[in-house]
Image (cartoon, helix red, strand yellow):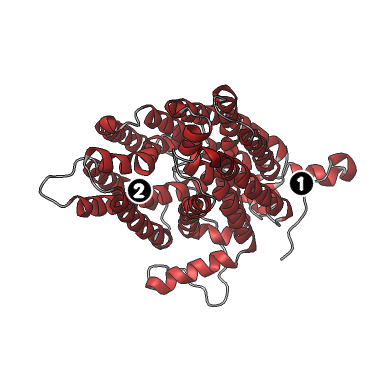
Amino acid sequence: MTVGPHGPALTVHRSAEALGPVALSVAHSTPAQERGQSPTSSASAPQPPRLKVADYGAYALLRAPLALLELPLFVLLPAFYAERLGMELALVGTVLFIARLIDAAADPAIGALLDRRPDPRTYRIWILWALPVLAAGYAALFRPPASISLPLWLALSSIVTYLAYSVVSIAYQAWGARLGSDTSERVAVTASREAAGLVGVLLSAALLLPERAHWLVALFIATALLAAVALLRAPNPRPLPSVPLQAGQTTDRSEGGAGAWLAGWREAFARGAFRRLLAIFLCNGIASAIPATLVLFYVGDVLGAPDRAPLFLMAYFLAAAVGMPLWTRLAARLGLRRTWLLGMGLSVAGFIWAFALGPGDTTPFLIVCLVTGLALGADLAIPPAMLATVLSDAPGERAREGTYFGLWNLATKLNLAAAAGLALPLLGLLGYVPGQSSEHTLSLSATYALLPCVLKLAAVGLLVAARLPASCDRQR
């Protein structure tokens, strides 16, 4: 139920007993070796200081107010305009679809614009400028003036809100990709960020009623102010390593317009490791987004307990927050790839159980929410860390974090769109009508629980077979 939610490679990790000192030297490589530098060059170059607990907190805090927006924008907004303001639901959906389409198309362009200014201060500056715009757009969404057409106001304010959110989130993720000097620190950066995000999601879930929309706006503004102050004390991104230019390359990224953006996207997709990781992320992301799209239908028509939906959502996200440190420790011990595979397997087990449930099975489904929520922690912490690892494996690509994370955000939004475009028409084809089709609850259960399992297992196969950087498999 994610809201808010992807030449030959070296096979590194075999047992130390089998390979002796060679395996031990690979398993305990230095950060410089992980980035492809020799130990000699790393000794002569100054090493960045290790991140402190306060550094993680100062960077991660911003994720909480950003997460506060996600459930209201995807779940509350249509109900607010249709129920409280009387706007036709089909018109609400059309306006929001167009606004989200514009937002999704803008993501890669925003990332490319960030890459044109590789100064370490760029991310902080963009975030601090975009946050007030985001707050204004979000507040405007829930305060439409009587003198302006509701559809027009919804369109304008939602486009402003979505675009400002994209600017902040892409700059924020690209900043995180340049924090940490090794795999364990990168996992800790993403885990602390997403743990703060889960706190924001829990707060918004507790207030997710149309009559409490103004409380959600006020809470976002207050937490965004605190996060902006914290960002002033957050660690700066690590400087990019100097890499010899290849024929035809230039260090000037200030020109080129759309041609330069397209060149950046071509370079990103030319990297086999990124293409493979993005395919896995998309397949797994659609699998996670389908239950998010259908959970209210499932709780209402299969379990017959629509009033329990907030409890189930709270349990789901709380389990993810509590389990985040577990995935961080497992990634350090088992490696990123194995840890993500374990999370996917746990999710499949939970959804297979959900398929077997029926009317009144609220306690078993609460357990399913806890299990799949725990698995969500791996989906939140591991893929961004793997992307950061893919980038760190080729230092020359570190100048294009914005492009990579712009494409990553685009994939995330396509996951939500694809889930709705696949699951809802399929249910209609099978004869399901919400609240009126008790004889079609089996098709609803299968679409809600089994279809994600099929996609998750496909993602498992892709991840097992993918040739990724050696550090994705490195164990402690």
Q: Can residue 178 be seen at all in this image of the molecule?
A: no
Q: Could you tell whether 390 is left or right of 401 in the image?
A: right
Which amino acid, mark 2? Tyr
Q: Residues within 10 Å of mark 1 (few under 14, many from 20)?
A: some
Camera-side residue: 444 or 177? 444
Q: Could you tell whether 156 is left or right of 472 in the image?
A: left
Q: Which residue is mark 2?
A: 165
What secondary structure is found at the residue carrying circle 2? helix
Q: Which residue is mark 1?
A: 26
What secondary structure is found at the residue carrying circle 1? helix
Q: Position of residue 79 (x, y in %)?
A: 31, 40
Camera-side residue: 408 or 214? 214
Cα separation between marks 2 and 1: 40 Å
In what quadrant of the picture does the C terminus appear?
Answer: top right
State the residue lying farthest toward the top: 363
Q: Position of residue 98 (x, y in %)?
A: 34, 58
Q: Residues within 10 Å of mark 2 (few under 14, many from 20)?
A: many
Q: Can residue 475 be seen at all in this image of the molecule?
A: yes
Location of residue 97 by image quarter: bottom left
Camera-side residue: 453 or 29? 453
Which amino acid, mark 1? Val
Camera-side residue: 245 or 276? 276
Task: Name the residue at 26% across, 44% down.
Answer: 132
State the residue lying farthest toward the bottom: 248
